[in-house]
Amino acid sequence: MDISPALLEDLISTLDVNQNGELSYKELVKGLELYQMEKRELKKKGLPIQEGQTDLRSYSIHNKEYM
């Protein structure tokens, strides 16, 4: 899977909770957990799961439950 530099930057910005320009292991794991939760919700609703489809921006980076 190829990822464009712009998409990679967007992904890092979305997952980088403390906005230091680096992803910690904790941030990455939490992002993967949110992604899996979203996939399960789509499956429950009977909606198609498309490759590369995610909406991590819907989660507040300031939400204490996030981290």
Image (cartoon, rainbow, N blue to C red):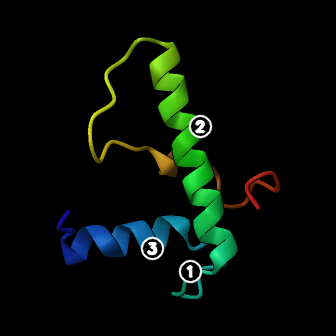
Q: In this view, does 37 lie to the left or right of 50?
A: right
Q: Residue at x 40, y 44 (%)?
A: 54
Seen as rendered, the residue at the extreme front is 1
Give the Cα separation between the discs numbered 1 and 2.
Answer: 20 Å
* Residue placed under numbered mark 2 in the picture: 37
What percent of the width, then of the height, locates residue 38? 52, 35
- Dots 2, 3 in contact, CB < 8 A: no
What percent of the width, then of the height, locates residue 41? 54, 25
Up-down relation of residue 42 to residue 51 (above or below): above
Q: In this view, does 64 lie to the left or right of 61?
A: right
The quarter of the rendered structure image containing the N terminus is bottom left
Look at label 2 and name its amino acid: Met
Look at label 1 and name its amino acid: Leu
* Secondary structure category for the residue under label 1: loop
Up-down relation of residue 32 to residue 26 (above or below): above
* Secondary structure category for the residue under label 3: helix
Q: Which of 18 and 46 is in front in this view?
A: 46
Q: Earlier in the sequence, mark 1 or mark 2?
A: 1
Q: How crowded is mark 1: few (under 14 residues within 10 Å), some or many (20 or more)?
A: some
Q: How crowded is mark 2: few (under 14 residues within 10 Å), some or many (20 or more)?
A: few
Give the Cα separation between the discs numbered 2 and 3.
Answer: 19 Å
Seen as rendered, the residue at the extreme top is 46
- Dots 3, 1 in contact, CB < 8 A: yes
The quarter of the rendered structure image containing the C terminus is bottom right
* Residue placed under numbered mark 1 in the picture: 23
Q: Which residue is drawn at 18% across and 71% down?
A: 4
Q: Residue at x 24, y 73 (%)?
A: 6
Look at label 3 and name its amino acid: Ile
What percent of the width, then of the height, locates residue 39? 48, 33
